[in-house]
Image (tube, rainbow, N blue to C red):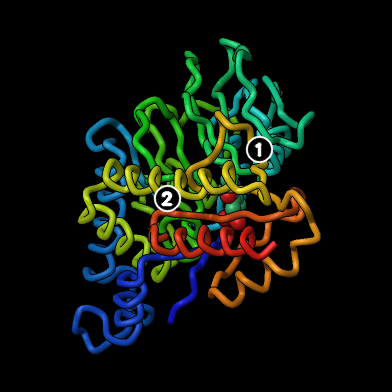
Amino acid sequence: MKKHNFSAGPSILPQEVLQKASEAVVNFNNLDLSLVEISHRSKDFISVMENATSLALELLGLENKGYKALFLQGGASMQFLMAAYNLLENKAAYLNTGTWSEKAIKEAKIFGEVVEVASSKDANFNYIPKNYSVPSDADYFHITTNNTIFGTQIKELPDTHVPLAADMSSDIFSRQIDFSKFGLIYAGAQKNMGPAGTTLVVVKEELLGKVSRAIPSMLNYQIMADKESMFNTPPVFAVYTSMLTLEWLKELGGISAIEKMNNAKSQLIYNEIDRNPLFKGFAAFEDRSTMSVTFNLSDATHKDRFDALCKEGGINGLNGHRSVGGYRASIYNAMQIESVQVLVDIMQTLEKNS
Ligand SMILES: *Cc1c(COP(=O)(O)O)cnc(C)c1O
């Protein structure tokens, strides 16, 4: 039987997506050719790219609203610098909610003044700062909507008058928010959409072309938009598999349908963490993520027993990030509630036997 995959990333994808992707690697569209050996300029691949970008905008509710969806390379980490390269003329504001925010801040500082409006570093990023103010002359305000490592998630979007930019790598397509509030959204595919190798970028076109610096072609959103993400050879397998996941999500009923399932899954495990005296949650109650569930054993002497039970139960990828320790259950869109129940049952078994 397949393992219950709680890995943080690369991470679980729907089984039917993996099946279809593997078939396309052998014989794509009955062409008697592999997806990975045909020209990216062929009509068969161009329609994959068109379908993937239009599905992304459709699911986010951003069609015909002046946005462009791009599939780029270099991971979310490349977006840390591309965002600033393309949008930062004088000053940008950043909310520091963890390791990924810090990395984004570090890159942005190369391009201009960065104002860190608030940080939760004082408590090892176990909460989301609130009641901060964003300078009204900032070119944009950057947030990390889900803090993959720490298990916190921004529940209420900040009210600002400057364009919002967001790293949504680990919660894109997982919950319904007003995506039209954003000028820039980016997400590495390998958390909630597809294999590593591509990054979805959704950018409002009116924000482009405003900085005075020269931008190298490969890092220029406008060029990538004008060339429909095909300035150079795109990562064809990653884009195709992402397209399959977006089709799967649309068929399920889109973001609002998956959000209900995600809420049920996260409630199931948080209820157990709160009820079971052997466990305690890491993130502040009101900021708990529905995607990345961080927790610890109250008594570390149970560790070997818990790890053995998890292994026996087919649980994969539950170790917490080294900067937090403990455990992290990544329960992305493709994770079934049955797998979360298996983990909860193991937590209860540990309690009974302790
Ligand atoms: C994983 C992750 C990243 C880094 O993504 P890469 O694609 O490896 O560059 C950035 N931000 C967040 C929120 C992440 O979860």
Rendered image: mark on residue 265: 2
Whether ligand 1 has any atom under 8 Å from the Cβ at mark 2 is answered as: no
Q: Does residue 220 appear in the picture of this structure? A: no
User: Residue 140: percent from the left, percent from the top?
Assistant: 54, 24
Check disc 2 and report its element: helix, strand or loop: helix
Query: Which quarter of the picture shows residue 232?
Result: bottom left
Check disc 1 and report its element: helix, strand or loop: helix
Q: Compared with residue 351, is residue 139 higher up or lower down, i.e. above or below? A: above
The residue located at (63%, 23%) in the rendering is: 93
Q: Does residue 91 appear in the picture of this structure? A: yes
User: Residue 163: percent from the left, percent from the top?
Assistant: 47, 23
Q: Compared with residue 158, is residue 316 higher up or lower down, i.e. above or below? A: below
Q: CA distance from mark 1 to mark 2?
A: 26 Å
User: Residue 147: percent from the left, percent from the top?
Assistant: 60, 42
Q: Nearer the viewer, residue 288 or 58?
A: 288
The residue located at (53%, 52%) in the rendering is: 218
Mark 1 or 2: in front is: 2
